[in-house]
Amino acid sequence: MPIVTLREAIEAHVRDGDAVALEGFTHLIPFAAGQEIIRQGRRRLHLIRMTPDLVYDQMVGAGCARALTFSWGGNPGVGSAHRIREAIEAGWPQPLEVCEHSHAGMAAGYVAGAARLPFGVLRGYLGTDLARHNPAIRSVECPYTGERLATVPALNPDVTILHAQKADRSGNVLISGILGAQKEAGLAARKLLVTVEEVVEDLAAPMNAVVLPHWVITAVACVPGGAWPSYARGYYPRDNAFYIAWDEISRDRQRFTDWIARYVHGTPDFAGFLARLRADGGLA
């Protein structure tokens, strides 16, 4: 399992048309990887994420996506994800097909995918009208009790990308702190890419931390700060000011396009992005 640059990882493993999941729940969101996908001009992606927030707002607005499977979308604590919203409502920069679930439904899909089962089962959805809008939601009768249960198809991304605190030199990865569906999304994928804050000799994993073994990981890239503006426990806090600033940046097509041109396409990598943003006063 090689430790490579992020550019090399995306270039080798993310293809146009892939189903790609960038997971991380409030914490350890793989922003650097999302921006590298934009920088390399990937197109027609089916994006999968429980909570598509700023990272997918950037990717959708940059024209990377044709479809989105999700369970909540927005700018957390601020408001709408304006680029996602305009893609759905107005087809700009291109139409976006959506498949909406609840958090429980997405989790069940990832768990089924990780177990290599065809579908997940849950008690949610029954009695709601979401199934009328999402034909993927169906039901089965329990063979033991006769109870009618909701089902969702397994989620098996072509590529899942995570951000984590550490990897060792063998490629084992440590994730600690708040977890969403990172482990399940990683194990459900055909390929798993992980960006980390640092590469160390010994993970020194604390109790209840998640350690992803090297044999389930396709590639690791060391990208310090790679979850910014979300936070990485033990490394840096959430940049709440940027989430607020993003609301204005993303509202206007031209302002958004200019921002992507200057800060993503106009920089060679995530370190360059952070340096330019800091020089322009957009990063403390």
Image (cartoon, rainbow, N blue to C red):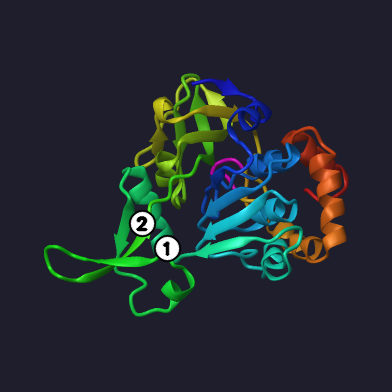
Q: Classify mark 1: helix, strand or loop.
A: loop
What is the C-alpha distance between the residues marked 2 and 1? 13 Å
Q: Which residue is label 1 attached to? A: 136
Magenta stretch: dominant SS? loop
**Looking at the image, is 103 positioned above or below residue 216?**
below
Instruction: Say what secondary structure mark 2 lies in.
Output: helix
Q: Amino acid at mark 1?
A: Ala
Name the amino acid type tagged 2. Ala
Residue 135: where, in percent of width, then height? 44, 67
* Residue range (magenta): 231-235
- The quadrant in which residue 202 appears is top left
Residue 117 lies in the magenta-colored region:
no
Q: Earlier in the sequence, mark 2 or mark 1?
A: 2
Q: On the image, numbered disc 2 is attached to which residue?
A: 108
Q: Position of residue 251 (x, y in %)?
A: 79, 66
Give the numbered dot on residue 55: none
Tell me if 13 is positioned left or right of 38 in this view: left
Point 76% across, 58% down: residue = 93
Residue 222 placed where, x, y %? 61, 29
**Does residue 126 sit above or below 9 in this rendering?**
below
Which label lies toward us, 2 or 1? 1
* Callout 1 crowding tier (Cα within 10 Å): few <14, some 14–19, many ≥20: some
Which quadrant of the figure has residue 163? top right
**Residue 209 left/right relative to 260:** left
Residue at screen point 78% across, 48% down = 283
Residue 278 visible: no
Identity of the residue drawn at 36% across and 56% down: 108
